[in-house]
Image (tube, grey):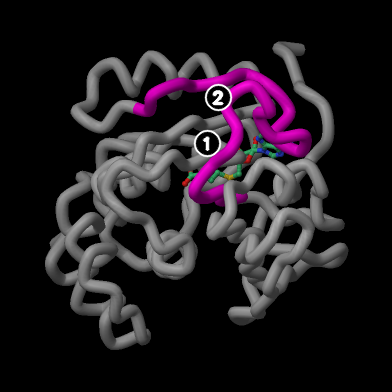
Amino acid sequence: MRNHLVAELKTKGITDENVLRAIAKVPRHLYLDSSFEAHAYQDKAFPIGANQTISQPYTVAIQSSLLDVKTGDKILEVGTGCGYQTAVLIALGAKVYTIERQLELFKKTKLFFQQMPYRPKKMIYGDGYIGCAGQAPFDGVIVTAGAPQLPQALLKQLRLGGRLVIPVGEGNTQLMHKYIKTATTKFSKSLHGEFRFVPLLEDKEGLN
Ligand code: SAH
């Protein structure tokens, strides 16, 4: 089923062989609630609790390709969710620092990572809008929620040559943006199509 998903992603235009290999490796069905397991290898988003969704495989593939991950790269992920995108980055050879703002999801996914072979370097409960200055600079930063505006802190935390991949937009849809740090305060920017994400929210959220 995983190979079938990879074939589908190829027909949709994903060409990055490393990313396709990583997606072929990671057992997406384990990251979903068992009620959705049967659909895990369809190219669709699904609920993961706490009003959040696991990103569609196509979106994971695009963002991972744009991030241009090399083995050993230090990557910051904003929006851990169920940890599927995290696992794909780890399968690509990255050392991943991942931030989640919802305590419920943070706790659930932290326990889950302990049972899985793909584990991040560090999982942080906090507001990814401000990034993670303590661990900066990063080779790449990936944001898996839609940002109304570009969080400046995330640009600052890139090393020279580092990439930021982030969906930006205030309405229901966002445009995928990629920034590359070309000098201390200089960035090149490119756009990569329209997507629909849950919103990137500021501040942490605890248990109600
Ligand atoms: N990569 C995840 C996508 C989850 S949806 C997956 O594949 O499962 C986006 C996630 O971003 C949600 O879990 C949401 O709680 C989280 N999020 C939103 N705003 C955030 C912020 N400011 N800091 C950290 N996480 C945030």
At 45% across and 35% down in the image, what residue appears? Answer: 82
Where 137 sits versus 2, above or below?
above
**Magenta residues?**
120-143
Where is residue 204, by image quadrant?
top right
Query: Between 151 and 116, which is closer to the camera in this rendering?
Result: 151
Q: Is residue 128 left or right of residue 76?
A: right
Q: Which residue is mark 1?
A: 81
Where 181 sits versus 95, above or below?
below
Q: Which residue is mark 2?
A: 105
Query: Between 53 and 6, which is closer to the camera in this rendering?
Result: 6
Name the kind of residue labelled 2 in the image. Leu
Where is residue 118, by image quadrant?
top left
At 29% across and 80% down in the image, what residue appears? Answer: 15
Q: Is mark 1 within 8 Å of ligand 1?
A: yes
Which quadrant is the N terminus positioned in? bottom left
Where 101 sits versus 81, above or below?
above
Measured in 3D between alpha carbons, the distance from the residue under mark 2 to the one under mark 1, in whole angstroms, is 6 Å
- Label 2 SS: helix
Q: Residue furthest front?
A: 183
Q: Is residue 103 left or right of residue 111?
A: right
Per the rendering, the mark at residue 202 is: none
- The picture places residue 92, in percent across and down from the top left corner, at 27, 51
Q: Is residue 131 magenta?
A: yes
User: Mark 2 and 1 residues: CB-CB less than 8 Å, in contact?
Assistant: yes
User: Neighbour class for label 2 at 10 Å: few (<14), some, many (≥20)?
Assistant: many
- The picture places residue 192, in percent across and down from the top left corner, at 59, 79
Which quadrant is the C terminus positioned in? top right
Name the kind of residue labelled 1 in the image. Gly
